[in-house]
Image (cartoon, rainbow, N blue to C red):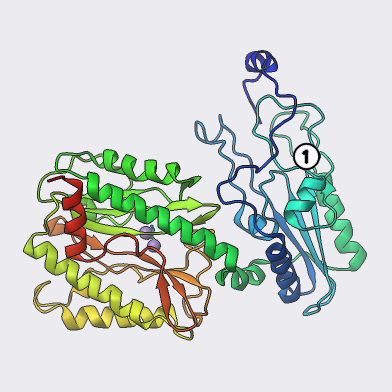
Amino acid sequence: MHRHLSRFAVVAAGFMLATPIAAQQGAPGGPVPVELLRHRRAAFLASMPAGVAVIRSARIRSIEGDYPQDSDYRESNDFFYLTGIESPGGVLVMIQPDSGSARGEARLYLNPPPARPDPVSAPRTAAGPAAARLTGLEVVHARPPVPRPIRRGEAVIDPLDVVIDSIGGAHQLATIDYRRTIGPLRAVKDADEIRRLRIASGISAEAHRAAMQATRPGMWEYEIEAVLEYTFRRRGAERVGYPSIVGSGPNSTLLHYDLSRRQTVDGDIILIDAAAEFGYYTADVTRSFPINGRFTPRQRAIYALVLGSQQAAIDAIAPGITLAELNRISRDYMKEHSGTLCGDQSCDRYFIHGLGHMVGLDVHDINPYFTELRPGMTLTIEPGIYLPDEALGIRIEDVLLVTETGSENLSAGVPRTVDAIEALMASGRGP
Ligand code: GLY
Ligand code: MN
Ligand code: MN
């Protein structure tokens, strides 16, 4: 990695801290409880086929090579799920000699602690007792350093890959593609994952409320985006779960409009699809509301149809049902209640995307579309109707946690009905 280090290093040396701040200290999400990490790894080993699974941490992005200021390190989801730590260079090796057995071993390799204080980078979790404490592993191995290329761009062999090959060779085990092992595990959230999703959804709901209260005709879309993202960050979200969608008027009909460049005008609808990522878990929340605080009769009618279609699906969520079935239920509702709102045809021809998806570490999380829902799964329900000829797009999206008997709406803190939205917007405008 290239850093313009020389001048900076001289200046920074004068301010060097005697004791570096412990890595991950102060992360708003807090540590993942070690008993849950141990349980996740045991479940992984119990369900993986015989072989070696290699779960790598994320790459450090290059400030010069990728995007300006894009060094914000975010751990890879699978690595974080199984170790609970952020550690560039880290590799978790899961070794299972017999398919389906309770045996097996998790071996974690992390960079050794830096030999000298690093005046440039944020501290990261390195091999040692702190890493063992955070991960719940007895031993955390220091990985051998990767040699620097002699010429720029030259391929180098990572000595850890040689170590991993020798583990496989010694046990006569092949390296496996572990996605089918981790997918079903990540789909059902444990208590700490639900805690994080609950907070991410709560922060997102608060931000949507703030946006509803702040919005006035004439504001630019980016100003409204700033209200949302200010609330995310102020409440401890590390980043947005995905680029915020703030689309007014014609932009409300573009599913993933992310430019936020238009000035709103009186009479517009605005569609906001934005959510916080908290402790690595993201919500996914959409609300659509009138810029001036009052729905027109037409906006109100389309809104009511989308809301009814969303509620029909939410009411049907229970263990055993599939997302595919919920999609059919929601569309059937829309077909039956369209009347003449969309002309001769049902409005569901303008419902141009799927009803929902799983959410978790990824906004579009491992997606068992045809798999029966189980308690602990978290998904979105997000019907929409998009009418470009009328510059009118309505989507309503919430995060639902599947429970033993039905579901819980984790993003219920932001109004969903026409009356509740109008009341909140009026409260933001003062007497
Ligand atoms: N925010 C992306 C989606 O709703 O799927
Ligand atoms: Mn979504
Ligand atoms: Mn969304």
Q: Residue sitting at 62 percent across and 20 percent down?
A: 4
Q: Residue sitting at 57 percent across and 36 percent down?
A: 71
Describe residue 267's horizontal placement relative to residue 164 as left or right: left
Seen in the picture, residue 133 relative to 372 is either above or below; the reply is above
Tag 1, which secondary structure?
Answer: loop
Describe residue 408's horizontal placement relative to residue 248 as left or right: right
Name the one closer to the observer, 33 or 378: 33
The x and y percentages for residue 324 are 40, 80
Q: Residue sitting at 39 percent across and 54 percent down?
A: 204
Name the one closer to the observer, 251 or 305: 305
Neighbour tally class for label 1: few under 14, some 14-19, many 20 plus, Cα within 10 Å? few
Query: Which image quadrant for residue 315?
Result: bottom left
Q: Residue under circle 1?
A: 156
User: Is residue 269 among what the camera can see?
Assistant: no
How many numbered tags mark residues here?
Answer: 1
The x and y percentages for residue 60 are 63, 40
Describe residue 50's horizontal placement relative to residue 361 as left or right: right
Q: Residue furthest bottom?
A: 320
The x and y percentages for residue 369 are 46, 76
Q: Residue furthest right?
A: 170
Quarter of the image with the N terminus in it: top right
The x and y percentages for residue 417 are 22, 66
Describe residue 386's horizontal placement relative to residue 356 as left or right: left
Seen in the picture, residue 3 relative to 271 is either above or below; the reply is above
Seen in the picture, residue 86 relative to 285 is either above or below; the reply is above
Q: Residue sitting at 28 percent across and 67 percent down?
A: 352
Seen in the picture, residue 7 relative to 403 is either above or below; the reply is above
Q: Quadrant of ligand 1?
A: bottom left
Q: Three-letter amino acid code at disc 1?
A: Val
User: Is residue 100 among what the camera can see?
Assistant: yes
